[in-house]
Structures are given as structure tokens and as C-alpha cells.
Amino acid sequence: MAIPSNSTKTLKLNNGLSIPAVGLGTWQSTDEEAYNAVIAALKAGYRHIDTAYCYGNEEPVGRAIKDSGVPRKDIFITTKLWGTDHTRAEEGLDKSLKLLGLDYVDLFLMHWPVPMNPNGNHDKFPTLPDGKRDILLDWNFVDTYREMQKLVASGKTKAIGVSNFSITNLKKLLADSQITIKPVVNQVETHGYLPQHKLLEYAKENDIVLEAYSPLGSTGAPLLKDELVQELAKKNGISESTLLISWSVWRGIVVLPKSVTPSRIADNLKIIELSDEDGKKLNELASIRGEKRLVSPPWDPIVVFNDED
Ligand code: NDP
């Protein structure tokens, strides 16, 4: 029997702030979709919205936050620094704040550990003449993070973190003597087919919260069609999406389901307290089906965005 748990469940970050365990994802949402989705989410009880400069929808997201009537201080808002802004992190955050119409965000993430040419042939995806991504080779993600640290004191963000970081890259970052503010989160692709058990263990050991992007398998939510997911959802009397989102929360992960459909947005917040038995079964899903990345490439800065490698 499913026990409805508190949909306003939060996790503690290593800087003392709390983060709502479920947040609305906004990637691949048009302006109109993003606006309506954020309004629907805040009405349904969400208090956590995940956006990014790269998604191109910070303006409607910010407008919806204002129009919702929910006090700003009650909403946890995350945005992300794009690769072409790695050498100018403060300008990157200023651009996002302006688009969002906000004075501060709660969390500012380095979107990828890959600095790209700020003066290249494209604002977001610059390429070299041979078609490969125009990656900066004389700047690295530790340099970027050092710049991001200054933004906490400026008050423009309450916390900083990373995204798409492997254990190797987290180790590199944490080993740097000038890193004085630990990332509060690492936002990564993780779902039933890519459980990231080792990365989760490392994050927990280092007091970094893992955030799950693409928790339903991204576009078209393919995980909802998995037989084991369907069987466990039926057993618990809940939808497949509720099961998967509840599993992430059971693992101690922040989870960011995206939907532009109001009924799904509301459903995705109705998490339950999953039993250890069912949680452990879902932990094994990838070993039964085979591990699959559905969205992102592996996170080595040299190979990411360098399409041919
Ligand atoms: P999700 O795993 O959240 O899946 C989104 C898809 O699932 C959409 O097609 C949506 O359809 C569908 N869906 C959502 N809820 C339901 C439901 N209850 N029943 C049936 N279908 C459903 O994918 P995302 O890749 O969008 O990941 C979530 C968020 O994570 C992103 O939006 C973004 O905020 C973040 N992210 C971060 C990345 C990073 O590099 N840091 C990379 C990728 C994502 P519909 O919308 O039509 O309802």
C-alpha cells in the first residue's frame, strides 16, 4: 500500500540551506510552454525550478515566477553557467538574472566542465573550421569554479555547484588549494538505466547532493515503458513516473522531472515513501537491461562536445 509522503520534502545542502527534493525541469520547453509549466508547477505545490541560460527560456520562467504570486523567497531557483561564459562567470550570471528578472538565484551551476570560446562563431555552440566544437584549451573548469566562488559573496547566488562532473573531475576540483567553497550539488544524468551508484556514493561521502536530470529517460519518458517499472508501479498503486521519482528521493537524490503537461506536473510531485525492497529492485534495473546513457555523452572535458572523439 502506497503511503503518500510529504511532497515538500527537502534535503540539506553542505552550506546549511535546504533544497526541495523535487524540482521542475524546463529543458526543451518553448517560451509559452515554460511559462505555463512554471505557473502550473507552483500552483501544484512545487517550490523548486531548474533552468539554464542555454535553455533560452529564463525570461518566461522568471515572468511566471513573478505572475504566480508565490513569494520569491519561498522558491528555490537554479540556473547554469554556459560553456561560452566560463571565462566571465559574473557576466554569465548577470545575463541570467536580467532574463529571469531576479536579484539572486538560489543555486548557480557550472553546466558542463567544458569551457568554450567566448568569441567564437556562435553564442552557445561555437565551432572550428573543421566543424569540431571550439573548446578553450588554455582555461579549465577549476579556473571557472574559482570565478564562480566570488559570486556567493556578491549575493547574486546563495550557492554554487557543478553539473556533468565525473568522480575524476570532482576530485580534481576538490584537490585545488584555492577551492574554499565546496559545490553543494552535482547535477547529472541518472535514472534506472544509468544509476551512477559509484558517483552517488562519492557525492555522499563528500557531502555533495546528487541531482538527477532526465529521471524519466528524457524526451518521451522511455523508462515509463519498462516492464519492471510498470510492475512495481502497479504493485504500489501509483503511476510509473511517481515510482521513478520516488525512487530517486529514496536514494537521497534531488530529482528534476520535466513536463509541460499540467496533469503530469501535478502527478510528478506526488511522491511516496518507497520500500527498501522496491528501491533495491530498481537499483538493479541497469544490470538487467544494460547501462544506457540516453542524453549526455561521458563527461571527460576533452571528449564532451568534440563530436568525432
Ligand atoms: P525527463 O526525464 O524529465 O523527461 C521529460 C519527458 O517526460 C517529456 O517528454 C515529458 O513530456 C515526459 N513526462 C514527464 N512527466 C510525465 C508523466 N508523468 N507521464 C508521462 N510522461 C511524462 O527529461 P529531461 O531530459 O527534460 O530532464 C529533466 C530536467 O533536467 C530538464 O528539463 C532540465 O531542467 C534538467 N537537465 C539538465 C541537464 C544538464 O546538463 N544539467 C541535461 C538535461 C536535463 P511532456 O513535457 O510533453 O509532458
Image (cartoon, helix red, strand yellow):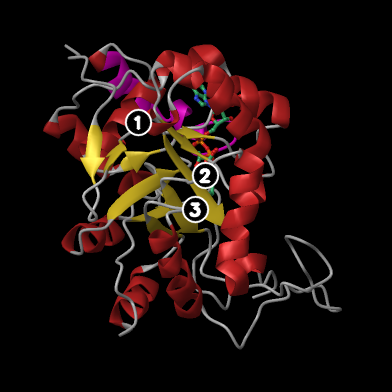
Check the image and report above or below for 21 versus 253.
above
Give the residue displayed 24% in from the left and 55% down from the top: 15
Q: Quadrant of the C terminus?
A: bottom right
Q: Residues within 10 Å of mark 2 (few under 14, many from 20)?
A: few
Main SS of the magenta part reads helix
Q: Nearer the viewer, residue 257 or 49?
A: 49
User: Which one is closest to the eye, mark 1 or mark 3?
Assistant: 1
- Residue 63 picture location, percent across and down: 63, 28
Q: Amino acid at mark 2?
A: Asp
Q: Amino acid at mark 3?
A: Arg
Tags 1 and 3 touching, CB below 8 Å: no
- At mark 2, the secondary structure is loop
- Residue 53 picture location, percent across and down: 63, 50
- At mark 3, the secondary structure is loop
- Identify the disc placed on residue 106: none
- Can residue 260 be seen? no
Q: Amino acid at mark 1?
A: Ile
Q: Quadrant of the N terminus?
A: top left
Residue topped by disc 2: 103
Residue topped by disc 3: 293
Give the residue displayed 23% in from the left and 40% down from the top: 11
